[in-house]
Each structure stands twice: as structure tokens, then as C-alpha cells.
Amino acid sequence: MKTVLISGGGIAGSALAHLLHRRGLAPVVVERAPGLRRGGQAVDVRGVALDVVDGMGLLEQARGMRTRMRGMSVLDPDGNEIDRSTEATFSSGRLDSADIELLRDDLVHLLHEHTRQDVEYVFGDSITALSEGADGVRADFAHGPSRTFDLVVGADGLHSTVRRLVFGPEERFAHHLGSYVSVFGADNFLALDNWQLWLQDGDAGFGIMPVRDNAELRIAFGFHSGPLDGDHRDTEWLRGLVTDKLAALRWEPTRLAKAAAEAPDFFCDAMAQIRMDHWTRGRFALLGDAGYCASPLSGQGTSLALVGARVLADELGRAGDGHRGAFNRYEARMRPFVALNQALATENPDGPASEESVARAKNAIALDG
């Protein structure tokens, strides 16, 4: 049985593990975090990605986890409503769409629960070195013993370790989009009832949505900036930066800054895309954000991860010509889909892409039966 090491236990990695196991391969998932990561923004499962989730047998459960927004308000910098909609929100698009918006951590938990009995997960560890030989890849780990696998897949996000070790430094492939985003949770101190708020104040702004039956908020705060001169893993440095920027807002600065300062699930990173000529090399492949991050501005990162996992698993599952042929077909099938979806992030820098562009991009690939 062919063994596949997957770096990253998020959406892309867990989906791939699930799909590979069903095709007779033996995946092992290594995740740096000590357990499933909590928090994160609401994500969208759109278009053909719905067929991927349906093929896993998880569509009805995913639908049951979807957000239940009634609409949104757009506020001026002082908190006065200047626009509203009961038909669409900036985070999900049209509310009557068949697409699903749900919390990232809910989707990760769903995928993990339907995978963990069949797949080995190693939490609290990470790859430190990879050495390819004629018969496989030796992987060294920060804590566990070295092991050898037939293939290695990097599903480890924007700052992928596998990409760095196999393809080279991040600077070769990362394209900064001129801003940063921070996401964190808080109690529902605004008493929002399935209603989103969006506000822009100078070069900063936020979207706030209630979740967990309106008991909590998820706050997505963005600000324009060139690449910051600091360590992207230094959470407390980033927290201080975001807290200061929130404190400078004209509306609700104190409570928003306090929420960021206290949030156990605080996250902040650059809005960036990963653009590469190849996502595979030898016995290595990249999946999702590790290979073709479109950035949250596209609204399609989750769908790209799910569809990429399905295509890669399909090709490896039927690879009569070995992994090289499978990898070549994976790249050929995914590249047009990735290009259209990455373009969504840059179509309209001041707002979401057009409905027509989203509709075209989210369905621009055919799955095998």
C-alpha cells in the first residue's frame, strides 16, 4: 500500500487524507499544532466544491453547520448605517445561493471526525528535513523519529514548510497584495442577531458576524500595509500591532481592541498569493494554499483546497503510470481553475469580485464521476 505523508491537518490536508484512504492509499497527517486549530473566519464551499463534499458523504452535515445570516449593514467610520442588504453579505454572497458558508473550525472538525478512525494523525510535530531517494522520501521531524514514505504532500498553508524545503524560499513565490487580515473571536458584545456589520475607516476596516447561535462574534479586521518587517509566527507582536490599529478607530475602539488583546484564537497574516510554475517535483506535491493560495480576498481558498484534494486523490488512485503521471494530470487539470479563482482577488481591489466572475470561476473544472 502506497504511503503518503501529508504536512498540515487543516481543510486541505484532512480532505486529502479522507479521499486517499478511500482510494486504497495510506496517508499520515502531521500537524504542527497540538490539536485541531480553533477559530478562523467563515469560509465558503462553492460550486464544484459542493460536489466534492457531497462525494465524501458530508454535504448534509455541512449544510447543517452553515451560518444563518439575515443580512448586513455597512457603516461609516462613526458607526452610522449608510447601506444595508437582506439579499447578500460581503462574506458569503447571495443569501439564497446553494453555496455554503460555515466556520473554518467547524469544517475542519467535520473532516477530521470522518477521517481519524482510518488515518494516522500526528499532532504537535513538524517536518524538519526531506530527503528523496530511489524508493521513497525520508522525512525528519522536530520530535518524532524519522520515517520513509512513498510520497509527500505539502498542505501546510501560505508559509508551507514542504514548499520551502523542496522548491525554495517563500520570497520566490509569494506575491503581497498590499494588506493584512486579522481574525479573532469574542463574546457578542454588540448583541448582533444573525446580522453582519462592515465598516471602513481610512486604510483599515472590519467585518463582524455573530456565530454559535449569536453567542460569539468572529471579527475580521484588515488594514493596508506593505510587507511587515517581522516574524509572521510572532503572534504577540502581531497582536500588539492590530490592537493599536483597532484602538485608533472612531467606532467602538475600546471594545474591539480589548477583544483582540484577549482573544485566545487571535490570527493575523498577510493578504498574499502563491504563484508557481510547478506544484510537483519528484515525489512531492503541493495542495491548496501551499501551492496556489488565492488569499481570502478571492473567497475561494476553501473551494480550491477541496477541489485540489479531490483531483489529486483521483489521479493518484488510478495512477497506472506511477505518481509522475498522476502529478502531471493534477497540474494540467487544476491550473485553469486556479488561474480563474486567483483572479477574483485582484478583479476589484476595493470590494468583492462580480457575481458573474465568481459564478464562472467556482464551476470552471470538471470532476471525474
Image (cartoon, helix red, strand yellow):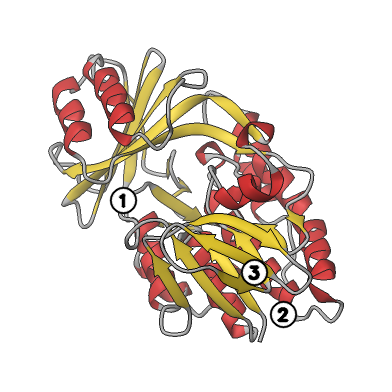
Please provide percent x and percent y for residue 80: 25, 20
Q: Is the C-beta separation of discs 1 and 2 under 8 Å? A: no
Up-down relation of residue 153 to residue 289 (above or below): below
Kind of residue at badge 2: Gly
The 10 Å Cα crowd at callout 1, few under 14, some 14 to 19, many 20 or more, is some
Q: Which residue is mark 2?
A: 317
Q: Is the C-beta separation of discs 3 and 1 under 8 Å? A: no
Question: How far apart in space, not on screen, are marks 1 and 2 (Cα)?
Answer: 33 Å
Query: From the viewer's perspective, is 350 left or right of 32?
Result: right
Kind of residue at badge 3: Arg
Give the mark nearest the N terminus, 3 or 1: 1
Nearer the observer: mark 2 or 3; the answer is 2
Q: Which residue is mark 1?
A: 39
Q: Which residue is mark 3?
A: 310
Please provide percent x and percent y for residue 226: 52, 18
Q: Is residue 147 visible?
A: yes
Place residue 21 in its image quadrant.
bottom right
The 10 Å Cα crowd at callout 2, few under 14, some 14 to 19, many 20 or more, is many
Residue located 64% across and 86% down the image:
24
Kind of residue at badge 1: Gly
Query: From the viewer's perspective, is 12 left or right of 109?
Result: right
Residue nearer the viewer, 16 or 334: 16
Q: Quadrant of the C terminus?
A: bottom right
Question: How far apart in space, not on screen, are marks 2 and 3 (Cα)?
Answer: 10 Å
Please provide percent x and percent y for residue 161: 56, 49
Place residue 117 in its image quadrant.
bottom left
Residue located 31% across and 51% down the image:
39
Give the mark nearest the N terminus, 2 or 3: 3
